[in-house]
């Protein structure tokens, strides 16, 4: 097994990886910007290296500095977590060329599945349903409009290299198409240095269902059930749960096998997630693949009893999966709330000093965070400061447990999304499982 791993990330995911490594008797190296010198991931790692000033481009995205940190500390592998360099095929390739193992999929898989248009074609080849749409990239507005007319409005224009809702525009009619098309291209270019977009038919009230995968270098691939991620705002997930109330055993097996087919088509290894959109008739369509560990991976861990980060490390070392498909059992129900330092009404960042930080506890409650009393939340990075996860025998019990845990979670000094989570958890439609990606519109548009 690896003797030392460098974590090319920060915050709660860096701490999560450090914990897994400690339980595997693996030494860890934390990298950090000057703004994160007092962070918990720096404190709990065996070694730490400052890699630059606060701006991400100069620190957590600074590939030469990260590789140098790995080399001077004799780290054998790098775990990228999620975000930053996690889905950067060039970084994965550089790791390999310098003799450092990248804990994730191959550069080829990252590049192929990171291009949404190519990923869509890959899914089609694997026999997985995809939404009707353009055959690859569309560059000209006139031809794009013609495709949209053939598909029928509404349609969605999506960045080929996109993620996080950037470079994405829903178009309800022909009148607004031209402006939306140009805006999607412009935003895609600014966010990803790639203006390529493609067009898909848009489902009005979809559910966002994703399948967790794990695959090894021996050709084994398994699915670990689904997660419901429909509660989101501006394409950013707020609440995730496992399993989904709408997915039964038959559908879980069918969707899981579709996800595995995609993984085997691209010779995938390590952790990955296949994301689907599902309409009101339970017809599902491939949306994209995330070639990394997900923010919401804890809900899958809670219902399967498996440690996905440890499995990532084992697989990266060259070991076969430690479980088979028939050993995966879904037990109980788990819900995760992303606690962000944001104004819960405006969803604008609220950085500052945590004057009080009292996380909840008790049976079935898990908190993933790198925050603490008097911690200063920097304004340079993602606003998520904690993930609150609960597990219970039933969904109803999990909802009540989450409500109790949210009441116990006391954070002062900054605004947080806790009030919004409480509002969602008490919503009758949420409690009944009547949700879609449009659920949050009721809070910004009460008339709907």
Image: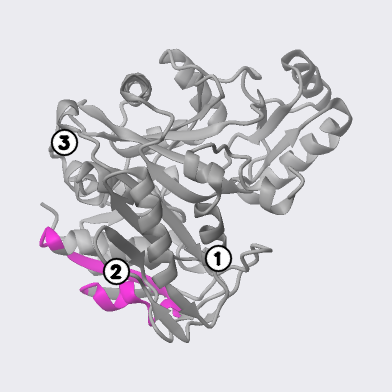
Q: Secondary structure at mark 3?
A: loop
Q: Is 167 in front, or is 434? A: 434
Give the extent of the magenta segment. 23-46
Taking the image as shown, residue 427 lies to the left or right of residue 177, namely left
Q: CA distance from mark 3 to mark 2?
A: 32 Å
Q: For the C terminus, give its image quadrant.
A: top right
Where is residue 189 drawn, in percent x and y? 68, 45
Q: Is residue 25 magenta?
A: yes
- N-term mark: 1 or 2: 2
Badge 1, how many Cα within 10 Å: few under 14, some, many 20+?
Answer: some
Badge 2, how many Cα within 10 Å: few under 14, some, many 20+?
Answer: some
Label number found at residue 361: 2
Badge 3, how many Cα within 10 Å: few under 14, some, many 20+?
Answer: many
Q: Is 9 in front, or is 444? A: 444
Where is residue 231 drawn, in percent x and y? 54, 45
- N-term mark: 1 or 3: 3
Q: Residue at x 48, y 38 (%)?
A: 433
- N-term mark: 3 or 2: 3
Q: Residue at x 25, y 29 (%)?
A: 222
């Amino acid at each position: 097994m690896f003797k030392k791993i460098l974590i090319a990330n920060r915050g709660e995911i860096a701490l999560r990886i450090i914990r897994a490594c400690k339980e595997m008797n693996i030494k860890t190296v934390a990298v950090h910007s000057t703004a994160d010198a007092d962070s918990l991931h720096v404190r709990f790692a065996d070694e730490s290296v400052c890699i630059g000033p606060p701006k991400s481009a100069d620190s957590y995205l600074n590939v030469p500095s990260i590789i140098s940190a790995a080399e001077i500390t004799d780290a054998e592998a790098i775990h990228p977590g999620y975000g930053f360099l996690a889905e950067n095929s060039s970084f994965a390739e550089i790791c390999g060329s310098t003799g450092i193992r990248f804990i994730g999929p191959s550069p080829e898989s990252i590049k192929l599945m990171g291009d949404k248009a190519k990923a869509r074609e890959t899914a089609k080849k694997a026999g997985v349903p995809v939404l009707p749409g353009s055959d690859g990239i569309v560059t000209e507005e006139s031809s794009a409009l013609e495709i949209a007319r053939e598909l029928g409005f509404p349609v969605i224009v999506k960045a080929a290299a996109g993620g996080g809702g950037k470079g994405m525009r829903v178009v309800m009619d022909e009148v607004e198409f031209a402006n939306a098309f140009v805006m999607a291209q412009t935003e895609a270019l600014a966010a990803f240095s790639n203006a390529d977009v493609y067009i898909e038919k848009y489902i009005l009230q979809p559910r966002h269902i994703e399948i967790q995968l794990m695959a090894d270098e021996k050709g084994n691939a398994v699915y670990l059930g689904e997660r419901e991620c429909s509660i989101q705002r501006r394409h950013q997930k707020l609440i995730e749960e496992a399993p989904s109330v709408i997915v039964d055993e038959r559908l879980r097996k069918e969707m899981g096998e579709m996800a595995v087919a995609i993984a085997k088509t691209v010779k995938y290894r390590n952790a990955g997630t296949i994301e689907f959109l599902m309409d009101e008739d339970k017809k599902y369509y491939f949306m994209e693949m995330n070639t990394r560990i997900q923010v919401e991976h804890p809900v899958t861990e809670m219902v399967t009893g498996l440690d996905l980060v440890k499995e990532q490390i084992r697989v990266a070392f060259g070991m076969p999966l430690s479980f088979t498909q028939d050993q995966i059992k879904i037990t109980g129900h788990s819900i995760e709330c992303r606690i962000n330092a944001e104004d819960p009404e405006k969803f604008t960042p609220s950085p500052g000093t945590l004057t009080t930080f009292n996380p909840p506890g008790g049976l079935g409650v898990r908190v993933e965070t790198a925050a603490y009393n008097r911690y200063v939340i920097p304004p340079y990075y993602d606003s998520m400061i904690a993930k609150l996860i609960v597990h219970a025998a039933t969904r109803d019990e999990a909802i009540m447990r989450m409500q109790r845990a949210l009441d116990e979670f006391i954070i002062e000094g900054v605004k947080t999304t806790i009030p919004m989570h409480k509002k969602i958890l008490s919503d009758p439609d949420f409690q009944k499982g009547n949700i879609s990606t449009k659920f949050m519109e009721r809070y910004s548009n009460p008339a709907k």
